[in-house]
Image (cartoon, helix red, strand yellow):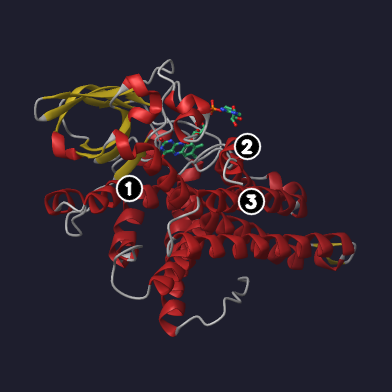
Amino acid sequence: MPLEDIEVGLSDEEQAVRDVAHKFAAEVMRPAGAELDRLADPAQVVAKDSVLWKVFDQYRALQFDAIEDGDGDGDPIQRTRVRYLVSEELGWGDSGLAISLAVAGFPAMFARISARPELIERFASPTEPQIGCWAITEPDHGSDSLAFDQPHFDDPAVRPNCVARKDGDEWVIKGQKAAWVSNGTIATTAALFCTIDPAEGFKGGGVALVPLDLDGVSRGAPLDKLGQRALNQGEIFFDDVRIPAEYMVIGKEAYGAVVEMVLALANAGMGTMFVGVARAALENALAYAKERVQGGVPIFQHQNVKSKLFKMFAQVEAARSLARRVSLYNSTHPPLVQYSIASKTFCTQTAFDVASAALQIYGGNGLSREYPAEKLLRDARASMIEDGCNDLLGLVGAEKL
Ligand SMILES: Cc1cc2nc3c(=O)[nH]c(=O)nc-3n(C[C@H](O)[C@H](O)[C@H](O)COP(=O)(O)OP(=O)(O)OC[C@H]3O[C@@H](n4cnc5c(N)ncnc54)[C@H](O)[C@@H]3O)c2cc1C
């Protein structure tokens, strides 16, 4: 039984898009996510016969990526509203797949930011869609590379693992990105965040669009992990990979501001997606509590279960309100990263807390892989590290207070 949505003033069109997203989440993502989650070997997730490809194909056919921020046509408030309604549904369907679909669009976003027609045609063509990734984390630098307002960010003593140097009309990339790069095993293009002036530490960074079929690119084995197992992740190695100078779309003068902007956009997206995870856990637990009989009545009739469910309901609604308010502000104004961080940390923590309470309501069945409760808990747990550890993000956001 789906949770009602009390968003005021939804147009028929907005309702219709949400219904389409819900159907896709329920009929395609949920079963695919459950199937991929159970695969023992993460290499099977990206195998030729994997259901992952059907998810990508059907998602593309729905054209949700055409709903953009910024200068696109139409009312920006309506566009944002549609995006967060869709994002919540995709998170509700399967968060690992939702992340995979979302990061696939990162290089196209940077091509559009560059405003260069040849890059837009090469990296953001709707007729030849790429699978992109956001490659920022390095083996030696996770939190380091996101914490743009912390003292280490311009310290040249912090040695990067991935550097690009200018050579005539080209950039030459050497080094590697960590096993945590989402879509790292399947991406055709990377939005690569790398160091271009090591004398300035991370601040001397740049963002390059890198086709991943170039000479010198290789990949690591798919990562095996606790949650969001449908999300493929893996290292990308660069051995003197050459790209044309114009593929470096962000230079060092803008790099710190771009890390802040991307964190603001990505964290706001994580907020809406993990409201979907929290909602899924609540809906499952509510349905189970109305069916499971103990002491002669459905466990929903026991006061402790009923009050637990109401607390979960209030938590989901509070997270939803924050996520939507922040998304609406940040996609219609210059984004304020502290609000996005508040949304991401609050919503992912809520997803984890609600998923944990849901598992308790399932009793022993909550621990069984035959029921959906344990997967949602594992998926939610991963989100508290993804896109920045929640504790570190809090420090970054606090600098703005
Ligand atoms: C599911 C998932 C998807 C991901 N997707 C991507 C992706 O698409 N692309 C990509 O590049 N990366 C991705 N990541 C990587 C993610 O961004 C990093 O894992 C995250 O930034 C934390 O880095 P780390 O794992 O190296 O932890 P570390 O940085 O080593 O942190 C370890 C601990 O130390 C704490 N800590 C670290 N530094 C500080 C500090 N300065 N002050 C106080 N405490 C600190 C942290 O809070 C944490 O508890 C993903 C990760 C996950 C889990």
In the image, is the residue at mark 2 within 8 Å of ligand 1 by its beta carbon?
Answer: yes
Q: Which of marks 2 and 1 is nearer the N terminus?
A: 1
Q: Earlier in the sequence, mark 2 or mark 3?
A: 3
Mark sitting on residue 346: 3
The amino acid type found where label 2 is placed reads Asp
Can you see residue 110? yes
At x 60%, y 37%, the residue is 395
Asked if the residue at tag 3 contacts the one at tag 2, i.e. Cβ–Cβ closer than 8 Å, the answer is: no
Mark sitting on residue 391: 2
- Percent x, y for residue 221? 37, 27
At x 45%, y 45%, the residue is 263
The amino acid type found where label 1 is placed reads Phe
Residue at numbered disc 1 = 106
Q: What element carries label 3?
A: helix
> Looking at the image, is mark 2 or mark 1 nearer the viewer?
2
Q: Distance between the residues labelled 2 and 3?
A: 11 Å
